[in-house]
Amino acid sequence: MALAAAPSSRFPTAPFRPSPSSPLQRHAHFRPQNPRRSPPPLLAAAAAAPLTAADTEGRKHELLRAVQETGRGSGASPDQRAAIEEAIVCVEELGAGEGVPLDLTALDGTWRLCYTSASDVLMLFEAAERLPLLQVGQIYQKFECKGRSDGGIVRNVVRWSIENLLEEQEGATLMVSAKFDVLSKRNIFLQFEEVAVENIKISEQLQALIAPAILPRSFLSLQILQFLKTFRAQVPISGPERCMCFHRIYQLYLEKEASGVCNSVETHRTL
């Protein structure tokens, strides 16, 4: 998919412009940029003058404001998506320029998803809307690459639940783990390793059904509760490696919480 502490500043570099021979990447569902489109006057002016700290914070806040009330992307209207794209372009201008390597120390940490255009993630939200008992809670990406320059490990973490059976929103965890190698500052090569379901937390109703409070807990009921508490099912992933594009993936820091978790805004495209 204890939370790792993330640094206080994370900004990707200027937009990656792929060549016609660029390989097909993993994520789709993104509107390609129009190469004939001239840059907005605001961005041209920003390039001419250095940005102040207030300008930087203003752009970050504007983007995070734009993604609010979008259901993390699943309920975004065309107008909202257009506003988010404009805010992303402004944040992208904060990058350090071409030729700067991907900063893995800045990437290291736990990132909470605030918005995405990745179709495989949006499918989870749509399933939760169609299935009344399914709940999709917070989604995180945990990068373990501090002090590295060549790659590391990334874990995609999805908190989910089933109403009345598991604790609300946080009843279980789906985790997809992968190793990654840095190809460029916009691309990492992913080799998926396993999918796991863990951290099962049953609801009070189910707990009362297994071991009623008015009756002494039997050895069997205690064994069942202990089994559910420590349950972990994992499936190794085999097959061809995949390449994940970092083009327009924005890990944006707004306010560090006590947990050290930072906010993440992602948009994906096919190259």
Image (spheres, rainbow, N blue to C red):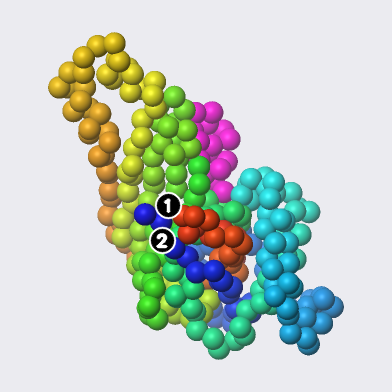
Task: Kindly check if marks 1 and 2 are in contact, taking CB atoms under 8 A apart as contact.
Answer: no
Q: CA distance from mark 1 to mark 2?
A: 13 Å
Q: Looking at the picture, which amino acid does disc 2 mark? A: Ala
Q: Looking at the picture, which amino acid does disc 1 mark? A: Val
Q: Residue at x 53, y 51 (%)?
A: 121
Q: Is residue 127 magenta?
A: yes
Mark 1 — residue? 157
* Magenta stretch in the rendered image: 122-136
Task: Kindly identify which numbered label has been placed on residue 24.
Answer: none
Can residue 267 be seen here? The reply is: no
Q: Residue at x 73, y 80 (%)?
A: 51
Mark 2 — residue? 4
Position of residue 64 measured from the top left corner of the image (x, y, whole percent):
67, 58
Work out whether 244 lies above or below 203. below
Q: Toward which corner of the image does residue 60 lie, by quadrant?
A: bottom right
State the residue in front, 35 or 153.
153
Q: Residue at x 50, y 84 (%)?
A: 101
Work out whether 140 lies above or below 145. above
Locate the N terminus and report the quarter of the image it occupies.
bottom left
Compared across the picture, whether 117 is left or right of 184 comes to right
